[in-house]
Image (spheres, rainbow, N blue to C red):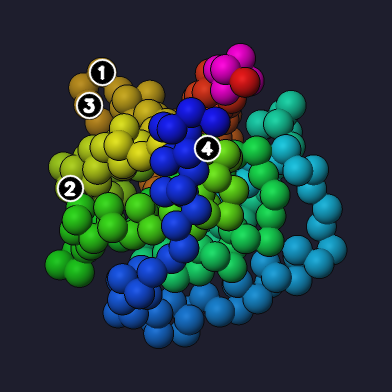
Amino acid sequence: MPLTCLILFAVLQTPLTAQDADLLTPYRAAAQKKWAKAIDEFDELNKTEAHPADSILFIGSSSIRRWLTMSTDMAPYATVRRGYGGAMYTDMAVFAERVVSPHQYRALVMFVGNGVVGAPTDHTPDQIEQLTRHIVHVSHQHQPRSPVFLIEITPCEKRFDAWPKIRAVNARLREIALSTPHTYFIPTASHYLKPDGTPRPELFVEDKLHLSESGYKLWSTLIRRRLDDVLQANVNAE
């Protein structure tokens, strides 16, 4: 095996450290209080659901949870849907091992649309970068050769006042993908904006936050296209 591959393999196999635990400590109690039941339900689903080892594992917040047509929208890819509504990057990081490790998957796809909503309590780009890198590391430790895809946060009317802050987070997600092996960014935001730079209302339901049927159709097209590009390139490289 080439030296560069050996180094990469060693990095991806590095176990989670005390620093990782320290990162999660401020968020653990709140995440447990709010989401313990939802994660317990995932554990129960894992006992009864069977998925092929080449499935795409989708984790994230309500846009993943509400994507009831995922299995047909993402065909021919087999999918595993593990989203819990309202989850922030802090919650995803706390529960990453429990959500990810029970599964075998060809790739992991993550979307988290919360944490930056235009409130004083918003997480900073630095916080979100640290948390996202932790989640990516959890996946790479579990399955070093399975790529991780980070979906760009979608611009929506309900949170459009916070769009400049959300764009800053999206820039960090892109940077994580550029600087981390086997990690990719899925750009989507421009497709959800009108020529005047405001959100396209037909792509969202009445709450002006969550995707409509048309919004999901567009989302699946963009996600599947990126998966096709990366996964086929990986096959060709083997």
Q: In front: 124, or 217?
A: 124
Quick check: is 235 in the magenta stretch?
yes
Q: Earlier in the sequence, mark 2 or mark 1?
A: 2
User: Residue at 47% across / 84% down in the picture?
Assistant: 33
- The numbered dot on residue 165 is 2
Q: Residue type at mark 1: give it.
A: Pro
Is residue 170 visible in the rendered image? The answer is: no
Q: Quadrant of residue 119?
A: bottom left
Q: Rounded to the nearest whole Å, what is the CA distance between mark 1 and mark 3?
A: 5 Å
Q: Residue type at mark 2: give it.
A: Lys
Q: In front: 39, or 119?
A: 39
Q: Which residue is mark 1?
A: 195
* Residue 165 percent location from the top left of the image: 17, 48
Is residue 122 visible in the rendered image? The answer is: yes
| Contact between labelled residues 3 and 1, with CB atoms less than 8 Å apart | yes
Q: Earlier in the sequence, mark 4 or mark 1?
A: 4
Q: Which residue is mark 4?
A: 147
Q: Which residue is mark 3?
A: 197
**Crowdedness of circle 4 by 10 Å Cα count: few (<14), some, many (20+)?**
many
Q: Earlier in the sequence, mark 4 or mark 2?
A: 4
* Residue 205 percent location from the top left of the image: 48, 44
| Contact between labelled residues 3 and 2, with CB atoms less than 8 Å apart | no
| Range of magenta residues | 233-237
User: Residue at 56% across / 79% down in the picture?
Assistant: 36
User: Residue at 54% across / 65% down in the picture?
Assistant: 97
